[in-house]
Each structure stands twice: as C-alpha cells, then as structure tokens.
Image (tube, rainbow, N blue to C red):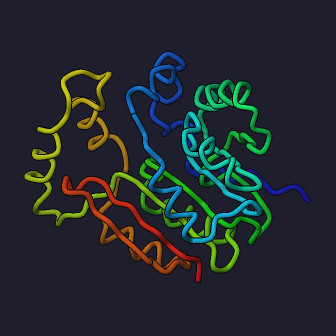
Amino acid sequence: MRQARRHFVFDELQHAGPEHLDPAYVAGYDRKARTDVSGDLGLLRDLGLRDSSTVLDIGAGTGTFALAAAPLCQRVVAVDVSPAMLDALRAKLETSGLTNVECVRAGFLTYETPAETVDFVYSRNALHHLPDFWKGIALKRIAGMLRRGGFLRLRDLVYSFAPEGADDAFEAWLAQAPLNAEEGWTREELETHIRDEYSTFSWLLEPMLEHAGFAIEDATHASSRAFSAYTCRKR
C-alpha cells in the first residue's frame, strides 16, 4: 500500500539557504569554503574506514569529502538537497575517474536506505538547516542506517555558550569575519545565519545525539564557540 504523503514534514529544500540553490554561488563555493577534510579522513581511518566500507555523506555539497573518501572505501553515497551542488559534484566526478560515488538528491529527512547498511556517516555544516525537533528526527534516522558500532562524524555551527552569553559570543565571532566574501563568510552572511537558520546549543544537541542511540566519544568546541565537531558511535 502506498504511504500517504505527510504534509507536516519539514521541507528541506525550502530551507536549504537560497544561495546553495544558486549555480553562480555554487561555482565559487569551494574557493570560499576552503574545506580541508584530511583530519576527518584520518580520524575515520583510525576508526576502521577501509576498502569494504560504505560511507554516507549527508549535505555533501560540492563533494569535497565524498571525493576524498572514495579512494579509501567501497562506496560513498553523496546526499544533498541542492540540484546545483549535486551538478557541481557530478562535474567533478566526470573528470575524477572515480566510479564508486553515488549522488542522491535528498536530505536528512528523505534519504532512504535499508537499516544498518552504512558503516560511517559524515555531515558537515548541514544539520543546522533543521529546527531542533527535526534534528532529533534526523539523528534517529541516521542511527537507524548505521550498523551497530558504526560512526557518525558531525561538524556544524553549534553554540557552546549559555543563552545569557549570546551577545558577547556573537559579537566576538562576527568581529572575526572577513570583509571580502571571497575570503569566507562575511559579517552580514553570519548575521543572516544567526537570524534565519537553526543552529542550536551544544547542551541541547548532545542529549539529542545520545537519545538517538549514539555514544559521544569526542566533542570539540572551537574557540569562537560557534563551531563544534562530534565523533559518535552507534550503541
């Protein structure tokens, strides 16, 4: 029987950030982001990433992590809600010679795979597009996809301060923003993030992870108190 459409489900495409759907913005994204995934790949290798592993990259963007992980494992599934991001990734794949990366247009709430068939899940700066209720749903879905003992490596904009410290923390973070948008995210862009997107407190996210079925094996908070990285094992 066909499942009825659930009209109450959060629309991830509509909340992806309009810039992420803009091909012109996506064309300069790698230069702006300057993402280095070598440390994360080294960590995952230490945790058991090998040539038989299946890796799921949710919020894959232009594929920086997916392309770097592909030579080290059997299969990478790169999931993103943005057609423009996936087009950029597919263009890279055409010249890479890699044949084990699958691109899927979906998100945390819509990607489907059989239970317990994924060894590692990686997500960087994507979960904050969901409000907290839907973060909880997303993390539970991720746990269901992972094999027991599998790992989630989660990086995101997470606020590791108390509510009463928000003004001081934000002002210090914003003061570090570059003036040139090509050199990173400007003060105006970060203000838009704070106002319009759904970054949460570390002391809310961490219980969500545990309730979803993860043991947090490592949590690192940036000096800006605006970014956090988690290594989580499925219990």
Q: In this rendering, would 88 be left or right of 95?
A: left
Using the image, determine if residue 39 lies above or below residue 46: above
Q: Residue at x 37, y 50 (%)?
A: 198
Q: Position of residue 229 (x, y in %)?
A: 38, 61
When the figure is inspected, residue 151 is found, relative to residue 211, above or below; the finding is above
Q: Is residue 124 left or right of residue 189?
A: right
150 or 128: nearer the eye? 150
Residue 199 vertical placement versus 34 (above, below): below
Residue at 60 percent across and 60 percent down: it is: 121
Quadrant location of the C terminus in the rendered image: bottom right
Tell me where residue 79 appears, x and y as whole percent: 65, 45
Q: x, y (%) of residue 87?
A: 66, 26
Assign the N terminus to one quadrant of the image.
bottom right
**Residue furthest out toward the right:** 1
Answer left or right for 98 relative to 25. right
Residue 171 location, quadrant: top left
Residue in the picture at 77% in, 55% down: 74
Q: Is residue 11 visible?
A: no
